[in-house]
Image: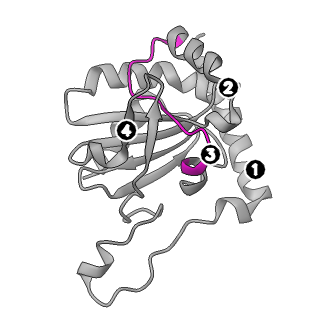
């Protein structure tokens, strides 16, 4: 696929994402706001999906069968990505995510690509997708859609950038390329 075609696809997907979010604002405006804090210590402990909040912890089973918690990655920058095998924008971003992961996995960052398994085509389809795309980063399976719901992954792909302190730096809806991932991780602490 050449650059013009890829750029066109990304542009069309971005317009579609914006249209969906304008059409159903009640679904996309549900970001939880931190309550007013009495002091800065109290506000530093707020857990939620809004930027500045501590990312809600979760435990899921990886495609490989091991259990994993988000808190296992405290001290690293994390791209927490929500995706499914049938999602065209997810398919478009996966090669970029794999390349970015390979170049940066030893530099204090990781990608947790949470598959929305409850909404996907089953374990065989996920396994085939991972093999076809040569994915080596952790793939947690959200079999009951609890984590996807918690993180408001209504439109996919949806990604959260989480800093080394466990705080959410940014929520990004839509496919990312390596340049964007680099930029977003630089902005995170």
Q: What are the residue bounds of the magenta stretch?
A: 133-147
The relative height of residue 97 versus residue 149 in the rendered view (above or below) is above
Say which quarter of the image contains residue 158: top right
Q: Secondary structure at mark 3?
A: loop
Work out how far the residue at label 2 is from the one at label 4, CA to CA, in angstroms: 27 Å
As drawn, 1 above or below 29: above
Q: Which secondary structure lies at badge 2? A: helix
Give the residue pinned by disc 3.
Answer: 145
Contact between labelled residues 3 and 1, with CB atoms less than 8 Å apart: no
Which of discs 4 and 1 lies nearer the camera? The answer is 4
Residue topped by disc 2: 88
**Label 1: how many Cα within 10 Å (few below 14, some 14–19, many 20+):** some
Q: Which residue is mark 4?
A: 68
Q: In the rendered structure, which disc, 2 or 4, sits on the residue that comes first in sequence?
A: 4
Counting residues from the N terminus, which is met first, the one under dot 3 or under dot 4?
4
Q: Earlier in the sequence, mark 1 or mark 3?
A: 1
- Which quadrant of the structure image shows residue 85? top right
Residues under labels 3 and 4: Cα distance? Answer: 16 Å
Q: Is residue 41 left or right of residue 85?
A: left
Numbered mark located on residue 102 in the image: none
Residue at screen point 54% across, 9% down: 132
Identity of the residue drawn at 35% across and 62% down: 54
Residue drawn at (21%, 36%) of the image: 108
In magenta stretch: residue 148:
no
Mark 4 and mark 1: span between their CA atoms?
A: 32 Å
Does residue 136 belong to the magenta stretch? yes
């Amino acid at each position: 696929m050449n650059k013009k075609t890829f750029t066109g696809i990304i542009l069309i997907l971005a317009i579609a994402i914006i249209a969906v979010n304008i059409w159903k604002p009640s679904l996309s405006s549900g970001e939880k706001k931190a309550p007013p804090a009495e002091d800065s210590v109290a506000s530093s402990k707020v857990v939620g999906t809004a930027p500045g909040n501590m990312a809600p912890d979760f435990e899921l089973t990886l495609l490989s069968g091991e259990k994993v918690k988000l808190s296992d990655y405290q001290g690293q920058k994390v791209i927490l990505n929500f995706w499914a095998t049938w999602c065209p924008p997810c398919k478009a971003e996966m090669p970029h995510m794999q390349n970015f992961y390979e170049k940066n996995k030893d530099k204090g960052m990781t990608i947790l690509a949470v598959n929305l398994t409850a909404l996907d085509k089953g374990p065989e389809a996920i396994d085939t997708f991972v093999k076809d795309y040569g994915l080596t980063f952790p793939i947690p399976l959200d079999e009951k859609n609890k984590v996807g719901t918690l993180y408001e992954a209504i439109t996919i792909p949806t990604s959260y950038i989480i800093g080394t302190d466990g705080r959410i730096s940014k929520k990004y809806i839509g496919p990312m390329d390596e340049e964007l991932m680099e930029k977003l991780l630089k902005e995170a602490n």
